Amino acid sequence: MSVTTQWIDVKADDGTFGAYLAIPHTGKGPGIVLLQEIFGVNEHIRSVAEQYAADGYVVLVPDLFWRSGAHIELIYDEAGWKRAVELMQATDFAKAQSDIALTVAALKARPELDGKLAVIGYCFGGMLAYNTAANGLVDAAIAYYGGGIQNQLQRAGDINVPLLMHFGGADSHIPMAAVQSIAERFEDNDEVEVHIYPGAEHGFNCSHRASYNQRAAAEAHGNSLTFLSDNL
């Protein structure tokens, strides 16, 4: 195998949660804390972690829904969507951010980590990645279609690390007006990039969804790898 994977435990004040670890074949590399969609650390998110590990990064993915049930995995059908929204609404965002901080610390303590550390988040995780950058926990951040970022622009001044945001030009969950407000807020910050992929829907990176857009996913991944190479 080109990468090795395992679940590890991370201790929090109110319990212990799992985190999915993917290590490149070299056995070491810069770090990525990868943050899930609202569907849990499912097959898709694990495959994304393994993809970045194949690219040479040590990746750790916290199970952010653990207080509702360990290792919840949902698929992209009607029942999955319904349960995913319930889980998101039940999430204490302050505790989720605390879990992310603990995950960052756990990755920094790993002997495989060699270099700086970034956060990458998708959808729900994209918004959390934005806040993780604002909290000063990482050296760089990437947010894929981060819903709600437009409502947290008061935190823009707290972001002092390179930030890359990907949005679909045909996202039915994030209006282009919202994306424009984000781009305008950061237009004077040379360390912040906003990429818009024409015709791409919400979740365009996920090959398990009907909204998957191969071209947008490939372009965004290439842009992300360049960004990581430049900043880690």
Image (spheres, helix red, strand yellow):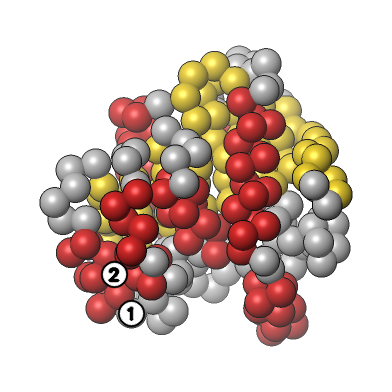
Could you say where residue 203 lies in the image, as x and y percent from the top left? 49, 66
- Which residue appears at 80% of the width and 36% of the height? 8
Contact? badges 2 and 1 (CB < 8 Å): yes
- Residue 175's disc is 1
Q: Nearer the viewer, residue 221 or 63?
A: 63
Report the amino acid beneath label 2.
Val
The residue sitting at 73% across, 41% down in the picture is: 20
Query: Quick check: 54 left or right of 213?
Result: right
Label 2 crowd (10 A; few <14 / some 14-19 / many >=20): many
**Visible in this render: residue 158?**
yes
Tag 2 residue: 179
Secondary structure beneath dot 1 equals: loop
- Taking depth in this image into account, of 41 and 214 the one nearest to the observer is 41
How dense is the environment of label 1, judged by Cα within 10 Å: few (below 14), some, or many (20 and up)? some
Residue at the far left in the pictured view: 188
The kind of residue on which mark 1 rests is: Pro
Q: Quadrant of the C terminus?
A: top left
Answer above or below: position of 185 versus 78: above
Taking the spot 74% from the left edge, 61% from the top edge, the residue there is 65
